[in-house]
Amino acid sequence: MRFDLITASPGIFEGWRSHSILARGQAAGHLQIEVHDLRDYTHDRYRQIDDYPYGGGAGMVLKVEPLAEALDAVRGMAPEEPEVVLLTPQGEPFVQATARELSALPRLVLVCGRYEGVDERVREHLVTREISIGDYVLTGGEVPAMAVVDAVARLVRGVLGDDASPEEESFSEPLLEYPQYTRPAEFHGWRVPAELLSGHHERVRLWRRMERLRRTLARRPELLRRASVSEEDRRLLARIV
Ligand code: ADE
């Protein structure tokens, strides 16, 4: 899958792009992540990408022309017609289902906005979708773009390797994960639950299911309403409450 990021701060992505799972995914040919400097699509000596808002007021507004030109150029860099996403607090909430949907596409272009504002014509005519990573305001769309690429890329076949299945964890089924432990079995008197040391597959399975339900009920009860709760889950829940 190919990702193109358009930003006024390309340096932010350098270390991120060349590290860990994303770097391996690129080296193995599963992912391609390209970063484009918005200022390369300006034509004045100041390489100006923002300007004062019509009607007055504080802050600067990201201009429409450099973005239009950047999007034209970036579109032409690969044959597939991309989804073009603007990262903005005004967008649709980004959830696991959004990541799953986007991971099925061959190509995604991400436009990093600025908190002060983006010319409305970008929204109306240049992007196909607007996404927010949460109800808080960041200084720009760069961190949100990293979050979206990370969540989408790990769902692309091959990126996590053959044995790991991204669909096994939290939010593919809308329950929180069970607690995990590794050696030692005791540290400062803090013990690993006996069920996990039992070597008994069925006990481990039931304990994990129970803990998922318990944790979800305690922390995110609204998720339980969306989960498909089995007869066994009902019995486990009854033991919790
Ligand atoms: N830009 C600034 N804040 C943002 C957010 N919460 N989500 C997406 N883009 C943003």
Image: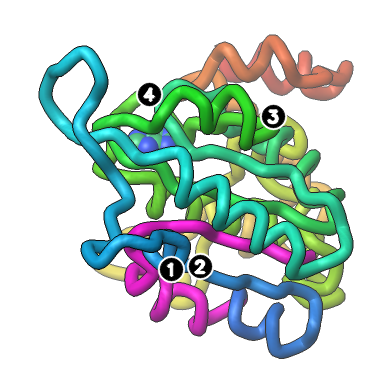
**In the image, which disc is placed on residue 118?**
none
Q: CA distance from mark 4 to mark 2?
A: 27 Å
The residue type indicated by label 4 comes to Asp
Lateral position of residue 151 relative to residue 12, left or right: right
Kindly identify the residue that appears in the image at 69 percent across and 81 percent down: 26
Q: Is residue 22 visible?
A: yes
Q: Which residue is mark 3?
A: 174
- What residue sits right under mark 2 in the picture? 36
- Relative to 132, 85 lies left or right: right
Q: Does the stretch in magenta take in 14?
A: yes
Residue annotated with mark 1: 40
Question: Regarding mark 1 in the picture, which secondary structure is present there?
Answer: helix
One can see residue 194 in this view = no
**SS class, disc 2:** strand
Residue 108, relative to residue 134: is it above or below? Answer: below
Residue pointed to by mark 4: 135
